[in-house]
Image (cartoon, rainbow, N blue to C red):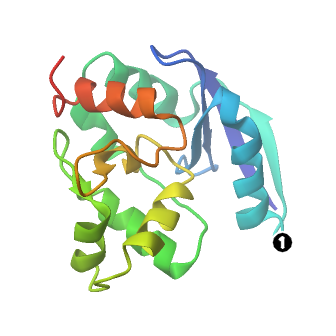
Amino acid sequence: MLTLLEDKISTPLGPLWVLCDERFQLRAVEWEEHSARMVELLNIHYRSEGYQRIAARNPGGLSQKLQDYFAGDLAIIDTLPTATGGTPFQREVWQMLRTIPCGQVMHYGQLAEILGRTGAARAVGAANGANPVSIVVPCHRVIGRNGTMTGYAGGVQRKEWLLRHEKYLLL
């Protein structure tokens, strides 16, 4: 059975769940009001092997590191370890998301082309939307081809805030 250590932190954008395994690899990072979505994804990825959630304060220092990100240490999220469920294609997309530098964006079609799947922008978008580790796996850095702020499960206002915080969007 997988043990997930969980904490909830305050951020400028509202409460944020931080869940990791006992090796302190992030398994989920999700906004409190989207807890049901987080539970759904946890069930999809881990129900067959079984999992339990245990409250923990700042497990592996991850909660503090995420608070440091919100306080302006933008590079810290590149150092945070993740271990996600998901299909091989989803994990491939999520790994690629982590290569988008802070302060830059990509559109879904570009991401599909880099993955060698030209024409799979919708599939990339679906994988992006199923990302269980928001912020750290920076799905907010993917925008529509015409520059629109599309497809962020945490809400477009949060996506815009994160992109301003990372200096992509100007105030």
Residue drawn where x is 33% and y is 39% of the image: 77
Is 20 located above or below residue 124 in the figure? above
- Image coordinates of residue 117 in percent, x first then y, are 32, 85
Q: Is residue 40 left or right of residue 135?
A: right
Residue drawn where x is 41% and y is 63% of the image: 94
Between 84 and 130, the one nearer to me in the picture: 130
Residue under label 1, please give it: 48
Which quarter of the rendering shows the N terminus?
Answer: bottom right
Which quarter of the rendering shows the C terminus?
Answer: top left
Q: Secondary structure at mark 1?
A: loop
Residue drawn where x is 42% and y is 51% of the image: 81
- Image coordinates of residue 4 in percent, x first then y, are 71, 46
- Image coordinates of residue 153 in percent, x first then y, are 54, 43
In which image quadrant can residue 7 be found? top right
Q: Is residue 168 left or right of residue 52?
A: left
Q: Is residue 47 left or right of residue 163?
A: right
- Image coordinates of residue 161 in percent, x first then y, are 34, 24
Residue drawn where x is 16% and y is 45% of the image: 104
Q: Is residue 4 left or right of residue 112?
A: right
The amino acid sitting under disc 1 is Ser
Between 120 and 95, the one nearer to me in the picture: 120
Please, which residue is most extreme toward the front here?
A: 146
Q: Residues within 10 Å of mark 1 (few under 14, many from 20)?
A: few
In which image quadrant can residue 20 be found? top right
